[in-house]
Image: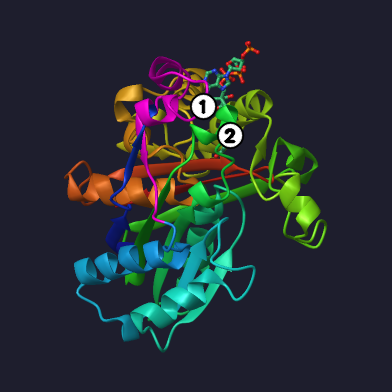
Amino acid sequence: MIRSRIIATGSYAPPKVLTNFDLEKMVETTDEWIISRSGIRERRIVETNVCTSDLGTQAALRALNAAGLSPEDLDFIITGTNSPDMSFPCTGCFIQAKIGAKKAAAFDVSAGCTSFIHALSLADKFIKEDPSRKVMVLGAEIMSKVTDWTDRATCVLFGDGAGAIILVGEEGERGVLSTHLHSDGSLWELLYMPGGGSANPSSHETVDKRMHYIKMAGNQLFKVAVRALADVSQEALKFNGLKNEDIDIMIPHQANTRIVEAMAKMINFPMEKIFLNIDKYGNTSSATIPIAMDEVQREGKVKAGDLMLLCSFGTGVTWGSAVIRW
Ligand code: UT7
């Protein structure tokens, strides 16, 4: 059976670190509150002249380097992002041009923080259609530029970064075993950015009303997130005939350590097998999972043949999972 196997990973986070202590000087908050309520200690923030495709480009080049491939080898570049360089063209086209992947078809996926899982699911289908294809999947975000730095309920949570993986078609047991995608658009008001689109085109008024920044009902989203992650993880296990103990490592979307702990408790999944790096990066939206995949790969926390469970949720509301034999 042909499967889409991940042959390489890469990630990039900008060098500038913003700690909780820095935030104490910006809004009415404390390091203690942020750590205890979210698990975040610091996050990376870009300089003003950096855009999302710059981060994606660095992650892409690192993944290509790890794969020993040249940019011209890529057939697709699928980029999950909620913070594109521009409304159009897509950020993937900027990445394609910056790395020189002349042959690749590039496009973006916008499905909140779950976008990377959606992009991975599409990549799997493209490879199943033609196993000779080489597909790059990215999650790339600059959340710091859509964050309201006067809103303490959101500005302490997000960060910037990008991750990339490369998949190829291969006969055998290793690769993507399943993906499951869901959404409930009736819950859109839990997390959104009202300004700048066709509903509220940019104007002096939208800027004055701070409509170009994230609006979030954190408490309500928290409960939806726990349920969604629990449900989609169990759905993925059941689909593959697996149990908790069969999974070697789970990488959940890194939005809040307490969300992950509550989900793990709900499905009785051991925290020791869950990888978290939210303390270092905060919530980088669709980039959290590929950044984490690159870290576990580089740190030797995953080996060939291991079973990995990815699960995510995000604005939309969307949620999804993937099971991968590494
Ligand atoms: O990728 C998906 C994106 N987002 C999420 O997944 C977010 C999901 N939600 C969460 O992670 C949590 O709801 C938060 C971390 C956002 C908030 O934690 P919480 O335990 O749900 O706190 P809360 O919103 O119920 O607020 C508790 C208190 C409030 O004060 P009062 O009303 O009890 O006096 C807030 O005003 O904490 C206050 N508060 C803060 N205090 C210090 C809110 N933000 C801060 C802050 N520092 N940064």
Q: Amino acid at mark 1?
A: Val
Q: In the image, residue 112 lies at what x, y percent?
A: 60, 49
Q: In the image, residue 324 lies at what x, y percent?
A: 38, 51
The range drawn in magenta is 21-47
Helix, strand or loop at label 1? It is loop
Residue 2 visible at all:
no
Which residue is more in the foreground, 302 or 213? 213
Q: Which mark is residue 27?
A: 1
Q: Within 8 Å: ligand 1 and the Cβ of disc 1?
A: yes
Q: Which mark is residue 145?
A: none
Up/down of 119 relative to 24, above or below:
below
* Quarter occupied by the N terminus: bottom left
Q: Amino acid at mark 2?
A: Thr
CA gap between label 2 and label 1 equals 6 Å
C-beta proximity under 8 Å, tags 2 and 1: yes
Helix, strand or loop at label 2? It is loop
Q: Residue at x 63, y 28 (%)?
A: 218
Up/down of 17 relative to 30, above or below:
below
